[in-house]
Image (cartoon, helix red, strand yellow):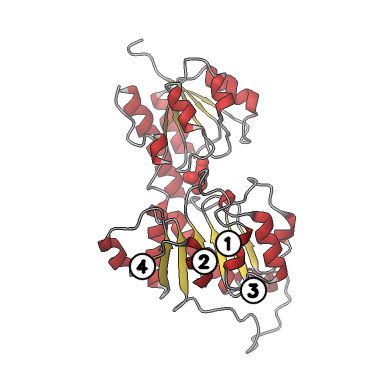
Amino acid sequence: MPGERLSVVVTRRLPEAVETRLKELFDVELNESDTPMSRDALQAAMRRADVLVPTVSDHIDGAMLAGVGDRLKLIANYGAGVDHIDVATARQRGIHVSNTPGVLTDDTADMTLALILAVTRRIPEGLALMQTGAWTGWSPTALMGGRIAGRRLGILGMGRIGQAVARRAKAFGMQIHYHNRRRLHKGIEEELEATWWESLDQMVSRMDVISVNCPHTPSTFHLMNARRLKLMKPSAVIVNTSRGEVIDENALTRMLRAGDIAGAGLDVFEHGHEVNPRLRELPNVVLLPHMGSATEEGRAEMGEKVIINIKTFDDGHRPPDLVVPSML
Ligand code: 8YV
């Protein structure tokens, strides 16, 4: 009915300012518990909402979408990655899906460099020494890591975030290489002094650092499988700020334990927050709790994007960050 406010269900607590603005504009139902909603609660919420604002913690598959009725019209994801949503089925059912691209690029790229440095310069080991009081003073041979300047960085997935990683890594003196479905325009390649590898196998076998920056899709699942991980130089390290599913985590753990790969920096895991316990035991592994986009600024801007997408949809237009299956 004209003038009626949209009913919006938000599945997780968002930054306060985002929640306040959402409440000013729409009839908002919040999940107050700050833990993900159960599957049943989520499906029930989707039945009574015009718009759902989910996060990466909500798995919205075809079976779930089949039982949501006709009311839901927009899934305005709070996040860039949409691999937890069956976008094709949503579209078939007339439900739009939008996301928040662009605003978390710099933060995620910063975290990628932080992981590269943390692993290669052994920062957690130094931190542990200080925190336990075990440091006995400077030594010429203690905690020697590897210099990243001059090293070859192979970026797997050269979208917005991959390119932002390349810019930063270039400033650190690294040599930029990449594998991507599509080759970059010549101008960008020249700016980044980036070398394109059509063959991922060949790139992987020649790099000192691999950075995973591609989304998780059916074609990128386990792209870094046991066979490819084995192609890495034993002195090389791998970092992932994208999605855990792109790396075969068990194979990676085995190789790290055996010393076949020198180290890893992981912000994301194959099974959500269930991290392989063996990974936690390894000194050459830096683990972070999916915090690549966790800045005050980034999370606020993600909220603004969600609001713009809902408002534009409410005004009868196509949400600016509409995700269509052909983009995936
Ligand atoms: C977000 C992310 O914080 O946007 C993404 O795809 O992976 C994260 O950095 C998260 O998805 C919030 O839903």
Label 1 SS: helix
Question: Could one spot residue 134 in this view of the protein?
Answer: yes
Front residue of 134 and 193: 193
Residue wearing tag 2: 204
Residue wearing tag 4: 194
Query: Is tag 2's residue or tag 3's residue first in the polypeptide sequence?
Result: 3
> Crowding at label 4, few (<14), some or many (≥20) Cα neighbours within 10 Å?
many
Above or below, comparing residue 303 to residue 103 in the picture? above
Residue wearing tag 3: 126
Mark 2 against mark 3, which lies toward the viewer? Answer: 2
What separation in Å lies between label 3 and label 4 (alpha carbons)? 33 Å
Estimate the x, y position of residue 248 in percent, counting from the top left: 63, 54
Asked if disc 2 and disc 3 are in contact, CB closer than 8 Å, the reply is no
Decide if ligand 1 comes within 8 Å of the CB at mark 3: no
Q: Which residue lies furthest to the top in this view?
A: 1
What separation in Å lies between label 1 and label 2 (alpha carbons)? 7 Å
Tag 4: amino acid = Ala
Q: Relative to residue 260, is residue 305 drawn left or right?
A: left
Tag 1: amino acid = Arg
User: The C terminus appears in which quarter of the rendering?
Assistant: top left
Question: Could one spot residue 74 in this view of the protein?
Answer: no
Q: Residue furthest bottom?
A: 140
Q: In which quarter of the image is residue 20?
A: top left
Residue 228: assigned label: 1
Query: Is tag 3's residue or tag 1's residue first in the polypeptide sequence?
Result: 3
Estimate the x, y position of residue 161 in percent, counting from the top left: 41, 55
Label 3 SS: helix
